[in-house]
Image (cartoon, helix red, strand yellow):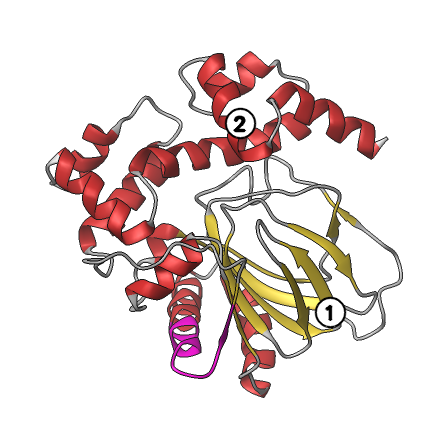
Amino acid sequence: MAESKIVERTIYQPCPGSIEGMPTRLQFFHAHPRVMMRPHWHAQIEVNYMVRGSVHYRMGGHDLRLGAGQMCLFWGGQPHRMDESSNDSVYAGAHLPLVHFFRMRLPPAISAMLMGGATMLTSKTDCADEQNFPRWHNWANSGDEVKAQHTVEELLLRVERMFMEPYTVVSSGKERKAESGSVPPSLGVVRMCDFIAGNYLEEIDATDIAASAGLHPKYAMNLFRKSTGMTLVKYLTLLRLSRAQAMLLNGNDSVLQVAMDSGFGSVSAFNKAFRQIAGKPPSDFRRDAHVASA
């Protein structure tokens, strides 16, 4: 990206091809961050590195200002909104689906705080980050599978290193504490996340998910909850809601059709789940978004 300042204020709008519409996608980015008209959510851990300029986030329970040279990590499943972005701002980073995030060797307490809504912030970055994040974006989108895989491995190691150096936890003070007996994510959790990613639009339940990892359903549900702070059903629902969000904002399909195409078995179940995350039914969400855009 050229070093000239960006003067045109742009607005972020979710679409079926964006991270909301493809909630199991691993996405790297390097761009001018666009402000959001409303909160959005997605089922990935978000890694942001501020190359220059600054941005301001409104999270579920706290605000965050990210300046040049800082890096942060947060759970995108909480509704969040970038409401400020300086004219010269450039950020880089990635959206990590849980199947990748839980491959990392992070302390259980870190995962618990992230999934509970906290943001991890560090200023311990250097010129290597300024060079690596743009390169990772280029390699991830190069079409070269070897480079793309190498990029993922490097990023995961970089995130692990974040917790070997000084960092700050930014939260409302209400994040979920690490439970007694919490365990690092196992291969079983990774297998379950992988199965959910490939089948979340189908009629699957906890029994199907557990079977994909060769586990007893009760044990699988307990293991997943201890590792992620969520139930299997909540994570499955979040993936479906992420896709539905993008469909509502881009298209004229009925709420019933959006519900069906997003994996929900009924419009009543869809309405209930959507209201819980957005604070309003899907029909009102779409109407308000269209009014705001106009």
Residues 140 and 9: in front is 9
**Left or right of 88 on screen, residue 143:** left
For mark 2, give the secondary structure: helix
Q: Residue at x 33, y 64 (%)?
A: 109
Residue 237 rendering spot, x and y as whole percentages: 41, 32
On-image quarter of the C terminus: top right
Position of residue 167 relative to residue 185, above or below, is below
Residue type, mark 1 in image? Ser
As for residue 163 lying within the magenta part, the answer is yes
Q: Residue at x 56, y 72 (%)?
A: 71
Res 157 seen here: yes
Position of residue 215 relative to residue 167, above or below, is above
Range shown magenta: 157-169
Q: Residue at x 51, y 40 (%)?
A: 22
Q: Earlier in the sequence, mark 2 or mark 1?
A: 1
**Left or right of 189 on screen, residue 289:** right
Res 142 seen here: no
Mark 1, residues whose alpha carbon is within 10 Å: few (<14), some, or many (≥20)?
Answer: many
Position of residue 87 relative to residue 132, above or below, is above
Residue at numbered disc 1 = 54
Position of residue 21 relative to residue 165, above or below, is above
Residue situated furthest bottom in the rendering: 127
Residue type, mark 2 in image? Phe
Which mark is drawn over residue 188? none
Residue 216: image quadrant is: top left
Which mark is drawn over residue 274? 2
On-image quarter of the N terminus: bottom right
Residue situated furthest right in the rendering: 7
Residue 68: image quadrant is: bottom right
